[in-house]
Image: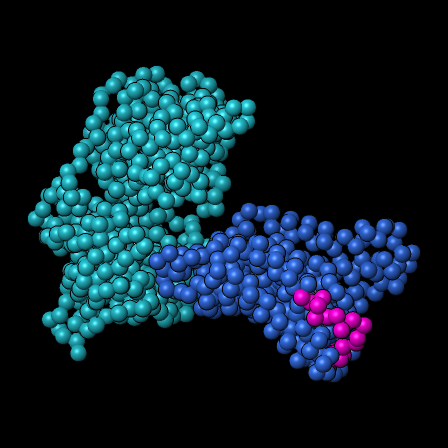
Chain colours: A blue, B cyan
Amino acid sequence: MDFSAINPTVLIASLMVASTPILLAALGELIVEKAGVLNLGVEGMMITGAVCGFAVAVESGSPWLGFLAAMAGGAVLALLFGVLTQLLLSNQVATGLALTLFGLGLSALIGQGYIGIKPPPVGDVNFGPLADIPVLGRILFRHDIIVYFSLAMVAGTWWWLKSTRAGLILRAVGESHEAAHALGYNVIGIRLAAIAFGGAMAGLGGAYLSLIRVPQWTEGMTAGAGWIALAIVVFASWRAGRVLLGAYLFGGVTVLQLNLQAAGLAVPVEYLSMSPYLITILVLVIMSSDRRKALGAPASLGRVFHASS
Amino acid sequence: MTQTDAPLLSVDGLTKAYPGVVANDHVSFEIQPGEVHALLGENGAGKSTLVKMIYGLVRPDAGGMRWQGDAYTPDSPHAARGTGVAMVFQHFSLFDALNVAENVALGMENPPPMAELSTQILRVSMDYGLPLDPERLVGELSAGERQRVEIIRCLLQDPKLLIMDEPTSVLTPQEVAILFDTLRQLSKEGMAILYISHKLEEIRTLCDNATILRLGKVVDRCNPREKTARELAEMMVGKLLHSPERAGATPGEIILNVTGLTQASPRPFGVGLKNVRLSVRAGEVLGIGGVAGNGQDELLDVLSGEIRTVPGTIQFKGQTVGHLGPNARRALGLLAAPEERLGHAAAPDMSLTENAALTGTIREGLSDRGFIRWGAAREFAERIIERFDVRTPGPDTAARALSGGNLQKFVIGREVLQRPDLLVVNQPTWGVDASAAADIRQALLDLAAQGAAVIVISQDLDELMEICDQFAALNEGRLTPPRPTKGLTVEEIGLMMGGAHDMEVAHAV
């Protein structure tokens, strides 16, 4: 065993990259659930985003067009869920599960011609001399723009939900759709917008995997990241700051266990591989065990809304 | 052009039909600035549909409205609020997990920034004697305080017409008096108030004019101050109601004895029970009053066995039952009918036969070695339908398809026919038309006359005074010692229910 190869600075820097796809998807789902909708199709939207982004980036040569296409792909798939659940009043759990299966199949179909290809590279943001600061420079100033975007979105989501009127209305819709309807808010319109946003964020997270993190296309490459994003939202008590914590914890344990595997730790690989899932859930359960904190749960979550009058 | 002599709002021939029912049929009335106008009618008379049309939530099929002489066709509550109409809802318009200021902001068209809004809320709430802390979560407020949130939300918009839908159903008598003071003050300042209620005495003390609705139609108009409550009731119901009769039986031995019962609520924002002590004798009806959300649901759950508790705190016929579940208690003769008809007392999409079997299996012997005896279950359902005059095509009808009154008769009848030694009911006549309510009350009295103990949890004080021998009130999970109903005054009852909470102080200033 040789643990000396594990460099804490590199570890932190790479955990940020590993966490970004989950963070993006979880922030999107946070908004969706705050609006009172439970979309279990995050995994399907992520992988659809991954393949859409990859294909468009390869064909156009521009990763940025790829990211935009990924967001569009995720949003379109999400809106399919939105139409089914909000307009046709289908069951949200069943529809969300179907969306995941559909997204996995659809992505495999689209991605057939793209296996083994390298996508156009995405460079890191150039911070000039800042990047050369020891330790901090490696951790803070040598990332691609999406990492910074995801962190900005954490703050943005927190601020938007807490301080803006639009955020207040969204929370109100998720809290009691009857009351919001009685006050004259367009419950279905607001929820569709939230669902589309969630899809776009999941799609972006997926494209981050296929264009930057891995970077190539393989079938089923999200490997459950969408499910972890879903779990993080719940255990983070629907708070943006805790979503960041949960995502980075998961990413951190993932990177650490890969390093431990490489260092030859005398623990079966299977245990190491499952550790990120176990540790993340465990920590988040402990964090959310206080019943009062469960108040973040939107009271109308997953309930079908039908304007009766 | 705005005409100065035109009424503030005139409603002309409004008609709205839903599949199978005409909710409003050519309804017309007028309201002047500063007038307190009552809309009087039973549940289902079409009052709510009418005000929803005025508030822009429902579009009329025919007819029109004029606001100060101009055509008024609100297509959303936003438009109605823009015109100067504000509404205090009976249900469903507050958000538990948001604070007072956020709730107020959601009901306003152009709310100021939060800090400024908070100062406005404080100022208006003190001006009208309705103290309120803008930072508190609405889910933690009492029913009376929640209503203040709604009223202040309306007042901040400076409306010309304030619609109040059954505003006193959740208030103690003292709180009602304070509300009326506020409303009189508003009316003096020129605000018109459209007051919806089925409580006759309130309308007689508060309102200048009344429009009476029955089955969607205007059946009469009057000055309620010139009519007696009985005359108003006859206009509203359209026939004479018989008052329940009770046979004055002497109470027997103690059936249920509850001591030192303390139980946290399993619901978010629920109210736990604190050191509850009560006892009921055979042949006695115990009424438990109190404003909703003071532990009523929890008390029913604890007595029915849905919430299990410390065994020794509940003694039924001398037996310790606190740890037993609902079926074990049913077997002993302790039955219950919860408040929520659809979803708690009955499974909405199941047939009446299935619903009859759900609670009747044990005492009526409707199962055989784990299999349901459908023939017997159906016969049981038919017996309930016949004995309690449930209007339905038959026992195969889904519970959801019954009207509120008919389903309630079925739910209560199902328990009564199982010959309980103790029946606990919560809100037995809530949202039920007057004749069904009278039938249900009579059934409860008959049950007591046959020697059973009955506990009626209700917010309808008139109902409790009518049928109960003993009265106790729940306030924040504490139960007052029961007192004989005879001779209790409204003031005493109000004080037992917690008085005006913290409102008197502000009004005295």
For residue A198, above or below residue A120? above
Q: Position of residue B165 (x, y in %)?
A: 27, 53
- Percent position (x, y) of residue B239? 15, 40
Tell me which residue sits at (48%, 46%) in the image. B268
Magenta region includes residue A111:
yes
Looking at the image, the residue that sits furthest to the right is A1
Which residue is more in the foreground, B304 or A128? B304
Q: Is residue B458 above or below residue A250?
A: above
Q: Position of residue B12 (x, y in %)?
A: 17, 64
> Which residue does the image show at 80% across and 57% down from the upper left?
A257
Q: Quadrant of the C terminus of chain B?
A: bottom left
Dividing the picture into quadrants, the one containing residue B475 is top left
Magenta part of the chain: A106-127
Number of numbered discs overlaid on the protein picture: 0
Query: Where A203 falls versus B22 (above or below)?
Result: below
Task: Check if residue A237 falls in the magenta segment.
Answer: no
Q: Quadrant of residue A45?
A: bottom right
The residue sitting at 30% across, 52% down in the picture is B20
- Horizontal side of B73 relative to B36 (left or right) equals right
Q: Position of residue A31 (x, y in %)?
A: 55, 63
Q: Quadrant of the N terminus of chain B?
A: bottom left
Do we see residue A133 in this rendering?
A: no
User: Closer to the camera, B40 or A250?
Assistant: B40
Q: Is residue A43 at least partly visible in the picture? A: yes
Horizontal relation, residue A13 to residue B75: left or right: right
Is B329 drawn above or below residue B160 in the view shown?
above
Residue drawn at (75%, 58%) of the image: A253
Residue A196 or residue A26, whichever sits in front: A196
Left or right: B198 as drawn, with respect to A4: left
